Image: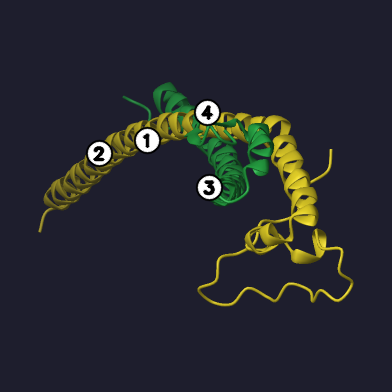
Chain colours: A green, B yellow
Amino acid sequence: MRSLNMKQNPFATFLVVLLFLGALATTGLSYSYIQKIRELRDLQNQTSVINRNRTMFQNLANDAIAYGQQNPKIFPLLEVVGIRVEEGQIRSSSTAN
Amino acid sequence: MEPSDNMNHSQDAANGHSHGETSAIDSLRESVQTLRSLFQATLVALVILAGSLSIFLLREVSLVRQQVRELNQFASTYETTTVPMMRDFRYKLIEFARLNPDFAPILSKYFNPTNFSDSPKVMPAPEPREGQAPRLPELPEN
């Protein structure tokens, strides 16, 4: 006669232990995932600010180049951001990368 | 009625009763066995579900961690190389605007005019209105 007692069913016990471990792993990973997502969101906000600043500096450099048509004394300043202007030719290299 | 008839009758009843109990126990045993099989199947399904979820989360965490690493590197590069260059450029342009006032309106589009004007009567920069381009923020000093 087969016993009906669950204590004598090692397969079920093994499955319960496995399920418990899986639930623990899922909980830990979920927590880690949420933390990382928060960090990523903060960094994405920071990156958008950085990109906005870079775009505005690019626009400032372009305006400075345009102003240089009237006053070429500004051209040496543009070399700070990697813009070289030679003999009236405006050649923009990488600015504020 | 004879006494032997009575005894036979009660024996038959006892046999019938015993047969009914055995049948009920067998039925119960079968039910428990079915329930146990269902329980084990449910456990297997839950284990598979938990395992799949763990693998999915592990991959997502790995992906997000990689993105965080890349963005951190990007921000770090910006802080160490681009910000000093921008700050230097800004200071030079402010100095240039002091010497060449006609450049000041161009610069004031991007920076607060009080930062580079010698005039004490310069009004503070107005709050950016809707549709107006925001000015660059003050760059952090090292």
Residues at badges 3 and 4 in contact (C-beta under 8 Å)? Answer: no
Q: Quadrant of the N terminus of chain B?
A: bottom left
What secondary structure is marked by label 2? helix
**Res. B34 mark:** 2
State which mark lies toward you, 2 or 3.
3
Residue A49: where, in percent of width, then height?
60, 51
| Residue occupied by mark 1 | B43
Look at the numbered disc 3 and give the secondary structure of its residue.
helix
- What chain letter is assigned to the residue under label 3? A
Question: In the picture provided, is B53 more to the left or to the right than B105?
Answer: left
The three-letter code of the residue at mark 4 reads: Gln
Tell me the mark number nearer the camera, choosing from 4 and 1: 4
**Circle 3 sits on which residue?**
A62
For residue B108, what is the image quadrant?
bottom right
**In terms of image quadrants, where is residue A80?**
top right
Q: Residue at x 66, y 56 (%)?
A: B136
Query: What residue is rendered at 50% in x and 28% in y?
Result: B62
For label 4, the residue is B66
Q: Residues within 10 Å of mark 2 (few under 14, many from 20)?
A: few
Q: Quadrant of the C terminus of chain B?
A: top right
Helix, strand or loop at mark 4: helix
